[in-house]
Amino acid sequence: MANITRNGLLIILSSPSGAGKTTLSRRLLEADPNVAFSISATTRPPRPGEEEGVHYYFKEPQEFARMAAEGEMLEHAEVFGHHYGSPRLPVEAAVNEGRDILFDVDWQGGQQIKNSALGNQSVSIFILPPSIAALAARLKARGQDTAEVIGFRMKKSRDEISHWDSYDYVLVNEDLATCESELKAIIRAERLRREHSKAALNTFVQGLNAEFERGLA
């Protein structure tokens, strides 16, 4: 069987808090060794136990600003006084080697990635909850947040859900196992898209045509 090499994918996964994005990301990373999680850069100082290039790329504010200004960030944003972003060069190297990179970002981050230099290699997937009542119940069941924080997350969810139609695929996470299966099916299909293997396919088809020529000679 022919071994057709391909470029890697930038897998953009978004959802309102509590819709299951984190669990789906973890399951995908555990099940598929060809998918790696994007390591972000940040201007905040390292916390105990965090390692450079493993948990984050730690940058001084001036260096981060330079990278953002010169197009070295696929996406970036300010969160609670610190800057976070996705450095382009390590992602570009992975994509060129045929490895897929998973991004856990919001709508704005996803749009920045899609509009970046690597945007043609991206596939965006939005995860919806089966209902708003189910979303609220999941947030409460986690037991991680105060009622005030849950209220803030629910208010933010409405804005996040409003951008569902800007994504390539939309999944409703009513049953986690079913949603996981659908997510993996999307990635399998995207890996087979012609544009992700165009250079290798061109070479392969040239070889087929050369066989025709030899046969006709």
Image (cartoon, rainbow, N blue to C red):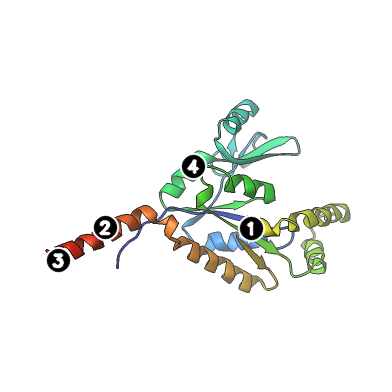
The x and y percentages for residue 51 are 57, 40
Q: Earlier in the sequence, mark 2 or mark 1?
A: 1
Q: Viewed as shown, does residue 69 lie left or right of 137?
A: left
Q: Earlier in the sequence, mark 2 or mark 4?
A: 4
Q: Earlier in the sequence, mark 3 or mark 4?
A: 4
The x and y percentages for residue 111 are 63, 48
Front in this rendered view, residue 33 or 162: 162
Which amino acid does the dot numbered 4 rest on? Pro
Q: Earlier in the sequence, mark 1 or mark 3?
A: 1
* Residue under label 4: 90
**SS at circle 2:** helix
Which amino acid does the dot numbered 1 rest on? Tyr
- Residue at 65% x, 33% y is 43
* Residue under label 1: 167
**SS at circle 3:** helix
The x and y percentages for residue 197 are 40, 56
Task: Single out the mark in the foreground, 3 or 4.
Answer: 3
Mark number, residue 187: none
Estimate the spatial distance between the alpha carbons at disc 1 and disc 4, rounded to whole Å.
24 Å
Q: Earlier in the sequence, mark 2 or mark 3?
A: 2
Task: Single out the mark in the foreground, 1 or 4.
Answer: 1
Estimate the spatial distance between the alpha carbons at disc 2 and disc 1, rounded to whole Å.
35 Å
Task: Single out the mark in the foreground, 2 or 1.
Answer: 2
Q: Residues within 10 Å of mark 3 (few under 14, many from 20)?
A: few
Q: Residues within 10 Å of mark 2 (few under 14, many from 20)?
A: few
